[in-house]
């Protein structure tokens, strides 16, 4: 049985309700509520008109759209962005323009994707004794492969 997530749209943004293009898609498209310009080399919060009430122990992740990344060098600065269950404000997408020219976002443009995930219950346990692993303490680039 699916979990219900209440969605409330900003006044005048009801036509921007999140939607999936195909029934089996993992994510709902988020759309811009406004016309605006994304300057080169800057991050800008783009409002979506979406407010939600997630069930306890759930989160929504805001992720980039691959087409915007490959065609226009548009990224999400804090990707994935996390929306906590207790947040009730308007969802905004923090977009970064890595391209060579300003990018014009129009109202209704699909700007990001939203995935809703259940969070496992986790207990962090203090410990002075961690088991060994094959990787050990090797960090960034430790495999020696590109």
Image (cartoon, rainbow, N blue to C red):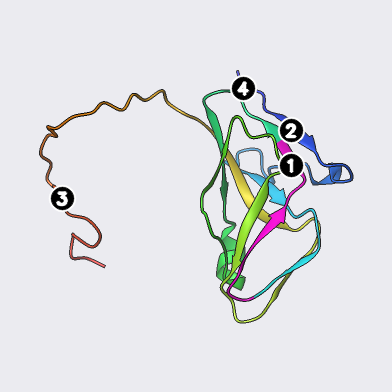
User: Disc 1 vs disc 3: Cβ atoms closer than 8 Å?
Assistant: no
Label 2 or label 3, whichever comes before in sequence order: 2
How many other residues sit within 10 Å of disc 2, few (<14), some (14-19) or many (≥20)?
Answer: some
Does dot 1 land on a helix, a strand or a loop?
strand
Residue 139 drawn at (x, y percent): 22, 55
Q: Determine which residue is flagged by label 3.
A: 137
Label 1 or label 3, whichever comes before in sequence order: 1
Compared across the picture, whether 130 is left or right of 12 comes to left
Label 2 or label 1, whichever comes before in sequence order: 2
Residue 121 drawn at (x, y percent): 41, 23
Residue 74 drawn at (x, y percent): 59, 67
Q: Nearer the viewer, residue 40 or 28?
A: 40
Q: Is residue 88 above or below residue 2?
A: below
Q: Determine which residue is flagged by label 4.
A: 2
Does dot 4 land on a helix, a strand or a loop?
loop
Tell me the distance, in whole angstroms, between the alpha carbons under discs 2 and 1: 7 Å
Label 4 or label 3, whichever comes before in sequence order: 4
Q: Is residue 86 above or below residue 39?
A: above
Q: Determine which residue is flagged by label 1.
A: 50
Q: Determine which residue is flagged by label 2.
A: 7
Question: Is residue 43 in the magenta section?
Answer: yes
For residue 61, the mark is none
Q: Which residues are magenta?
A: 40-51
Image point 17% across, 54% down: which residue? 138
């Amino acid at each position: 049985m699916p979990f219900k997530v209440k969605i409330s749209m900003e006044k005048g943004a009801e036509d921007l309700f999140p939607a999936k293009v195909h029934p089996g898609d993992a994510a709902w498209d988020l759309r811009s509520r406004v016309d605006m310009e994304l300057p080169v080399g800057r991050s800008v919060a783009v409002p979506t008109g979406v407010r939600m009430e997630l069930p306890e122990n759930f989160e929504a992740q805001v992720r980039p759209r691959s087409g915007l990344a490959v065609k226009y060098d548009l990224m999400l600065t804090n990707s994935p962005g996390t929306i906590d269950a207790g947040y009730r404000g308007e969802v905004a997408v923090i977009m970064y323009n890595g391209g060579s020219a300003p990018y014009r976002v129009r109202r209704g443009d699909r700007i990001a994707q939203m995935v809703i995930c259940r969070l496992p219950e986790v207990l962090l346990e203090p410990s002075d004794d961690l088991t060994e692993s094959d990787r050990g303490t090797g960090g960034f680039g430790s495999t020696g492969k590109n």
